[in-house]
Amino acid sequence: MSEARDQILSSIRKSLKRGALDEPHAQALRERLAAPRRNLIPERAARRDHAAQVDLFVAMAEEVQTTVTQVATAAEVPGAVAEYLSRHNLPSRLVMTPDPQLDSIPWEQRSMLEIRRGRAEGGDAVGVTACFAGVAETGTLMLISGPESPTRNNFLPDTHIVVMRGDQVVATYEDGWTRLRQQRRQADGSWEMPRTVNFITGPSRTGDIEQRIELGAHGPRRLHIILIGDGKAAADHGGPPA
Amino acid sequence: MQPTSHAFKENAHQALGNANLQKALGLMRAGFPAKRLATIARLPEFEALREEGKAIKDHVLENLDFYLETFERNVVARGGKVHWCRTPQEAREAVLGICRALDAKTVTKGKSMIAEEIALNDYLEANAITPVETDLGEYIIQIRKEYPSHIIAPAIHLVKEQVAESFRETHKELDPGRVLTEAPTLVAEARTVLREKFLAADIGITGANFCIAETGSSIIVTNEGNGDLTQTLTKAHIVLASLEKIVPTLEDVSTILRLLARSATGQEFSTYTTVSTGPRRAEDTDGPAEYHVVFLDNGRSAMLGTEFQDMLRCIRCGACMNHCPVYATVGGHAYGWVYPGPMGAVLTPTLVGVAEAGHLPNASTFCGRCESVCPMKIPLPRMMRHWREREFERKLSPANYRAGLAAWAFLARRPALYHWAVSIATRVLGVAGRRRGRFRSLPLAGGWTAGRDMPAPEGQSFQSLWAERRRSGKAA
């Protein structure tokens, strides 16, 4: 295939009426890649303070049929999970990612919850995961793959419950990338992308039959976020944009 | 697939008489444009983002060789492989080679227009590999043995009764007495049937909305989650992409992603935006063990530097067809190949030749809506005009059309003769049509009068009226 590769590259250069890029030009492009520059950032989320960003995150998520329960402390999470499952008449057996972010939650307080830590399989009806970040501008969850967070757990169970902290909410996608680069920076200055980064905005849906939106096409029918705050009551910081 | 773009007129005639299609197109006209408008109204920066998105893609196209090589280097650094393919045949062979090496029997597929372009399913089937489309729309048309009529809503030409009929014929193992009258039941049935396929498949094939040079990642944007199950549960993930999908950085793609869903379905953001980088890591407990990117050129590198270069900015959102009065009247299949609507009218002649697809750039009223809604500001009408010029230069248009244009050009270049001829024609037609005030048929204008009457001219031509007013000093 290297013949095809060479031919395609030379066809591109011929069409652009030049040879391979000269060194100063190529160096400028390498620098553009090494220090990614942000383009225009919409004001919607970026101009708010963090508490207002959290509110926007919740409002935008709810617009796309994500449901959100806000709790004050990690200790309240098992109760919130149990309450959600019983409200929707769902089984109390669930698969949970072996994510250390979920370790500090006192799951044993709710002995009714039957929890298996590990990878989701075809028959799992309810899954609990953590996430990497929440993006306020569109109510989007950002999840990354790794040994503690297999990607399939985000898709196989019918009901996906995400446990996150308020300080994981960022304003924009760019803020999510910045945080990811910082967290995964290697000693040599490079950084390592995870195999998969999932941006998830609401439960799975399709409009393929007569353009009517139906939830639960292939991924989860229900997406529920349990958002751990800082113990303070939520204030009114204004809703989503009109 | 064999293009039928040469038969656009016949295809369009049939489409106009197809009641199901007309009903389905009515739903589209009411849906996508209004949703798009409501969503972009909430984002004051939308117009400025369009300019930035356009600038990013223009920058990529000017440096495409550099970014492709960088992308490849980063894919390889993370354990993936890039396959360079000049033609659809090379791309099909590359996919088959990967399947054979892993002894694959079934592959699941996420939606990919490149797979349609290279007619991958037929080829895999001919080589004893079963492809299963998993996007609901693609699945519906696969079992109906059709091809997509819209680039983001492949089954938009169908009504739910047709889907129910196809499900009954295909899912023979299910209770024949089941009720399939509503969309939720149909969606649930497809979910159950396809879940088995996901778990059983050997290889997953997806398209790519974007390829990121900085990281060697491919990105898919979906609402169903099918593309994710496709690439996560299988031994290998094959990405089909055309060369121009490259975007430099994650920041750049974030900008373009703000345009994509809003322009396409009118969503703030699609449900799933998935960034895939290489195969699963050594310590991961799931994900594909192999990652392959199959790059297809198929004439695109030759579009650079021509009047069609701007077309390579296209991000396949479908806004142009959602807003096209011709598409909304005849549907996507009339265009006779993989890419319909205004973007198809420009792209199809490039990919299958203007001799086959010359009708498509003519199937436009030049109303300009496509260009005005295109997030990448692609001058679609101007490019259709380029194709019309090429068609004319290569003498591919019909003889009477060419003779008519030649006669018109002869007159238009001679103002005195033109005015004389127009005043004669106006008078003759005015007198001949005096009684009815219109003509039911006219020689040389049969195509026009077949569907409507031609009004008889009243009095003088515009130009002579104008000249008269100028003389009498009434005009400003």
Image: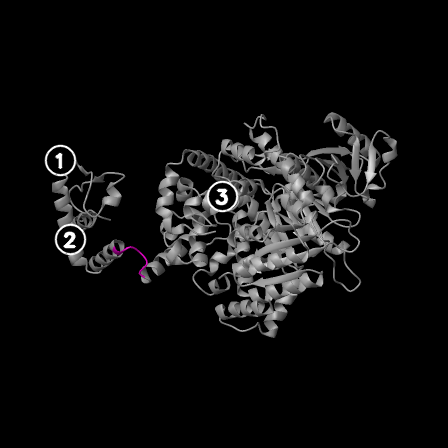
Q: Chain of mark 3?
A: B
Which amino acid, by three-letter code, is at mark 3?
Glu
Q: Which residues are magenta?
A: B395-399
- The residue that disc 2 covers is B421
Image location of residue B353, percent across then percent down? 41, 58
Image location of residue B31, percent across then percent down? 49, 36
Q: How far apart are the alpha carbons under marks 1 and 2?
A: 23 Å
Q: How far apart are the alpha carbons under marks 3 and 2?
A: 51 Å
- The residue that disc 3 covers is B146
Horizontal placement of A146 versus B355: left or right? right
Q: Is residue B396 magenta?
A: yes
Q: State which quadrant residue A193 falls in.
A: bottom right
Q: Earlier in the sequence, mark 1 or mark 2?
A: 2
Image location of residue B59, percent across then percent down? 55, 62
Q: Earlier in the sequence, mark 3 or mark 2?
A: 3
Q: Nearer the viewer, residue B243 or B35?
A: B243
Q: Earlier in the sequence, mark 3 or mark 1?
A: 3
From the viewer's perspective, is residue B30 above or below residue A197? above
Looking at the rendered image, the quarter that the N terminus of chain A falls into is bottom right
Could you tell me which secondary element the residue under label 2 belongs to?
helix
- The residue that disc 1 covers is B435
> Does any portion of residue B249 appear in the rendered image?
no
